[in-house]
Image: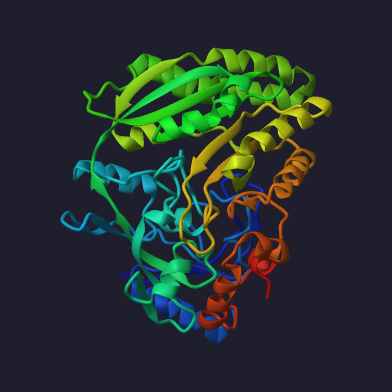
Amino acid sequence: MATTSRTASTWRNWAGNVTSRPVREVTPASVDELAEVVRRAAEDGLKVKAVGTGHSFTAVAATDGVLIRPDLLTGIRDIDRAGGTVTVEAGTPLKRLNVALAREGMSLTNMGDIMEQTVAGATSTGTHGTGRDSASTAAQIRALELVTADGSLLVCSEKENPEVFAAARLGLGALGVVTAITFAVEPVFLLTAREEPMAFDRVTAEFDEHVAENEHFEFYWFPHTGNCNTKRNNRSAGPAAPPGRVSGWVEDELLSNGLFQVACSLGRAVPPVVPAVARLSSRALSARTYTDIPYKVFTSPRRVRFMEMEYALPREAAVTALREVKAMIERSPLRVGFPVEVRTAPADDVTLSTAVGRETAYIAVHLYKGTPHRVYFTAVERIMIAHGGRPHWGKVHTRDAEYLAGVYPRFGEFTALRDRLDPQRLFANDYLRRVLGD
């Protein structure tokens, strides 16, 4: 099958806050075709970006040059049961990977809470879940393939091109186009999820305890209330006991998507009602326990569109920072209808990972799509950077290379590698110029 190429229309991300108009859009059907696309773009003096499903809130994938869609580079290439790995084409959506692995009796160890992204898009921007011992999606990579600026294919692992491997697992699309990823996997297992409402003061006082006692702990605080919803996921001997069809639909679709959509629309139209709606929303979710295979526990449908900013902090700073966010909202005229999410990750060794070299907690703030977000996000960002926060690469932030070089100990290592692999900045765009410098 030959590469399909066409004059591009306007490209938009999922949240609708980023648009770009590439000169052409291509859908290569093989790695060789992709390499040829890269070589031709370089000859034509055009920049190149690969996009996934557009789930980043930043312009990390935007281009006015050649837009590569990975829709034909999908599927599992190989499952190595003895070695505990799966090799998958870069354009494969996480949801398809999760379903295919489950069918083979395998699973990733940890994952984020949505699975719409492609594997390359998710790893390249630092997608993560929550975990005491298991880290981000990028940290689960054991090898990858990368088409570099000269059109050559680099195979990278701890043994082969290790310095590229360290950085390209979370490469922001700055080092080349990822074509395949090999993940560590394990035999499928069961997780028991325990969801429970809890007071803000109790969760924050017991935060370290909850993190230590659970394999995966996270919580959501509802602004304008003292209420949180906690979630603990731990491995289980079974048996499987998924949520009942009706009760699962009520929690995951009606309350978390349907009624929440109505509440968000109402809050956007009539901001003064937001605190009252938040109090109702925070009381609507009840305690429940269920047991299922990992992707059915870790991930949830997200049908309400929103804008998001997330910062990674040293874990010991998380509770202080969250209390500062709460105090800021309470003394301001802000009306925040979306919960604030708190998750954790162990330290890892991925060059530009938000958790590189330190135990990490994540604080994520959201606002319903179309609600003015700048005042709220700016106020939260001010608190986060005072604690040495690292912004999520795929979520709204205003940080630049000068700031980021100060919070990433291996920042210079990444930019030196970029100078070597892409000296002409074939893969550059405005976002990368801001966060990595020129």
Residue 68 is situated, as x and y percent measured from the top left of the image, at 48, 66
Query: Which residue corresponds to the image point at 62% horizontal and 22% vertical from the top-left?
Result: 200
Q: Nearer the viewer, residue 236 or 25?
A: 236
Q: Is residue 152 left or right of residue 429?
A: left
Name above or below for residue 152 compared with residue 247: below
Q: Nearer the viewer, residue 262 or 430?
A: 430
Q: Is residue 296 left or right of residue 391?
A: left
Q: Residue furthest left?
A: 82
Name above or below for residue 128 compared with residue 369: below
User: Split into 4 quadrants, where in the image is the N terminus?
Assistant: bottom left
Instruction: Answer with the quarter of the image where residue 139 lies.
Output: bottom left
Q: Is residue 191 left or right of residue 374?
A: left
Residue 27 visible in the displayed image = no
Q: Nearer the viewer, residue 274 or 233?
A: 233
Residue 48 is situated, as x and y percent measured from the top left of the image, at 54, 72
Residue 309 is situated, as x and y percent measured from the top left of the image, at 65, 44
Residue 327 visible in the displayed image = yes
Query: Which residue corresponds to the image point at 64% horizontal and 60% vertical from the top-left?
Result: 20
